[in-house]
Image: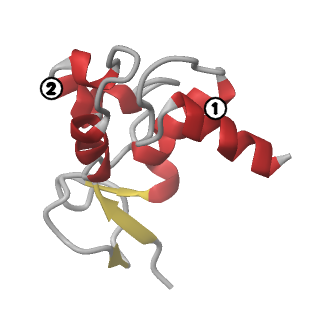
Amino acid sequence: MGRAVWNILGDGPLTTGVTAGAQQGLYAIDELPDEGLLGWQERALCAQTDPEAFFPEKGGSTREAKRVCTACDVRAECLEYALANDERFGIWGGLSERERRKLKRRAV
């Protein structure tokens, strides 16, 4: 039986029966290139946009930042990082500080 393979180029469906390196851009899930602990940040859409949108002044709109987060492939990793590191400012993983606090309280 073949192993599931993830296309890191994002231009094709999940493929089975292909080993890592058999096609350019395909890697077995457990053989993805090591991008380091914070490597996900390089793939984050917020890294390609205005950072001020993600750190609005008190009472400022979070709408634009949350819209960007909605389309981001690393949203889950971002939110996990913010929760684990108790990030107190900004939009992380599509949630504001207040929303992250509520999420943490519900998890307890």
Residue 50: horizontal and vertical position, in percent? Answer: 16, 20
Judge whether residue 80 can be spotted in this image. Answer: no
| Residue plotted at (30% across, 52% down) | 70
Given the image, on which type of amino acid does mark 1 rest? Leu
Farthest-out residue, front: 59
Q: Residues within 10 Å of mark 1 (few under 14, many from 20)?
A: some
**Could you tell whether 56 is left or right of 96 in the image?**
left
Mark 1 or mark 2: whose residue is earlier in sequence: 2
Residue picked out by circle 1? 83
Q: Is residue 44 left or right of residue 87?
A: left
Relative vertical location of residue 67 with respect to residue 36 in this rendering, above or below = below
Q: Is residue 55 left or right of residue 92?
A: left
* Residue 22: % across, % down: 25, 61
Callout 2 crowding tier (Cα within 10 Å): few <14, some 14–19, many ≥20: few
Q: Along the line of sight, which residue is nearer the eye, 70 or 24?
A: 70
Q: Measured along the vertical axis of the image, is residue 44 above or below residue 1?
A: above
- The vertical placement of 28 against 12, above or below, is above
The answer to which of 97 and 35 lies nearer the viewer is 97
What residue did someone put label 2 on? 49
Q: Residue 53 at what x, y percent from top left?
A: 24, 24
The answer to whether the residue labelled 1 contacts the one labelled 2, judged by CB atoms less than 8 Å apart, is no
The alpha-carbon separation of the residues under discs 1 and 2 comes to: 22 Å
Q: Residue at x 67, y 46 (%)?
A: 103
Q: Is residue 90 left or right of residue 68?
A: right
Count of all numbered marks drawn on residues in the image? 2
Image disc number at residue 57:
none
Q: Amino acid at mark 2?
A: Thr
